Image (spheres, rainbow, N blue to C red):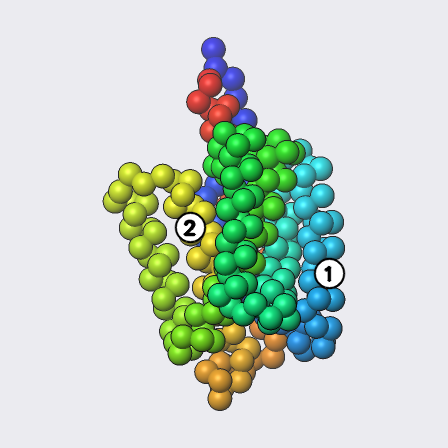
């Protein structure tokens, strides 16, 4: 007799997941810039603040016993805001530029995924139910969000595409990943992480499009206004759109 399927502590990866993820990454850009630039706190102090928020939020997420949508997405937002200021710190304050920052963050992400795989035998998000796996998951999420920010800034600022052009490039990349998901047998885990990384620079370029001056290709929204609007949209989506925890693939395959 088979038992009930154990649920992971992260949501099923559906279209709703990706909609909220893009909104969260866009908020990360406007919110991170609001604290580091508009409040003039700088990248280092802002990063320390957001890392502190992330640690508190992720501790609550790991402590709880089941999936809570608002708590989960609060942690994701914390990673996006922290990722924005950490990437800016690496790119601009450490003097290594966009290529150096992106390369460093890519290496850190690959190391975190490698350690996770060696420890657990899988980096699938369907296995995120135990505290140790959650730690691997959230460390990898933080690195992926930071890497995505660096890629977005690199593409928009140095390649002459601007914010709209950068958004189109990353949107096309996500469309290619979606096509691979539906029409090929490529690893779903690989496609997930590729999409997760690319949604961050898409959000970064969309965030810059919202709050940068018109002369620089933006729409000149206040960073505070853009952040508040995005936060309201996220809250509305989480409250109104159905989400449930994904099934733990290891437990499901054993039943």
Q: Residue furthest bottom?
A: 215
Residue name at image x 46 percent, y 17 percent: 255
Residue 96: where, in percent of width, then height? 57, 67
* Residue 116, placed above or below residue 170: above
Residue 95: where, in percent of width, then height? 60, 70
Q: Quadrant of residue 83?
A: bottom right
Count of all numbered marks drawn on residues in the image: 2
Classify residue 208 as left or right of residue 131.
left
Q: Quadrant of residue 43?
A: bottom right
The numbered mark, 2 or 1, whose residue comes first in the sequence reads 1
Classify residue 61 as left or right of residue 158.
right
Residue behind mark 2:
194
Task: Identify the element where label 1 is drawn.
Answer: helix
Q: Residue furthest top?
A: 1
Residue behind mark 1:
48
Bin the neighbour count of mark 1 within 10 Å (Cα to Cα): few under 14, some 14-19, many 20 and up. some
Task: Identify the element where label 2 is drawn.
Answer: helix
């Amino acid at each position: 007799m088979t038992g009930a399927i154990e649920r992971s502590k992260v949501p099923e990866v559906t279209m709703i997941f990706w909609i909220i993820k893009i909104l969260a990454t866009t908020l990360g850009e406007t919110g991170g810039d609001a604290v580091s630039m508009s409040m003039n706190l700088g990248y280092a102090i802002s990063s320390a603040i957001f890392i502190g928020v992330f640690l508190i939020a992720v501790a609550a997420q790991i402590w709880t016993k089941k999936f809570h949508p608002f708590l989960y997405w609060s942690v994701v937002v914390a990673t996006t805001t922290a990722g924005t200021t950490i990437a800016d710190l690496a790119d601009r304050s450490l003097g290594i530029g966009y290529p150096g920052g992106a390369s460093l963050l890519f290496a850190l992400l690959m190391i975190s995924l490698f350690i996770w795989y060696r420890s657990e035998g899988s980096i699938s998000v369907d296995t995120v139910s135990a505290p140790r796996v959650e730690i691997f998951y959230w460390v990898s999420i933080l690195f992926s969000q930071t890497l995505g920010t660096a890629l977005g800034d690199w593409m928009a600022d140095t390649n002459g595409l601007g914010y709209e052009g950068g958004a189109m490039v990353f949107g096309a990349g996500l469309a290619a990943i979606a096509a691979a998901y539906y029409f090929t047998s490529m690893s779903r885990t690989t496609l997930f992480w590729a999409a997760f990384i690319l949604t961050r620079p898409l959000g970064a370029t969309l965030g810059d499009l919202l709050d940068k001056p018109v002369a620089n290709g933006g729409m000149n929204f206040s960073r505070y206004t853009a952040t508040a609007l995005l936060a309201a949209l996220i809250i509305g989506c989480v409250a109104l759109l159905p989400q449930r925890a994904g099934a733990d693939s290891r437990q499901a395959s054993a039943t």
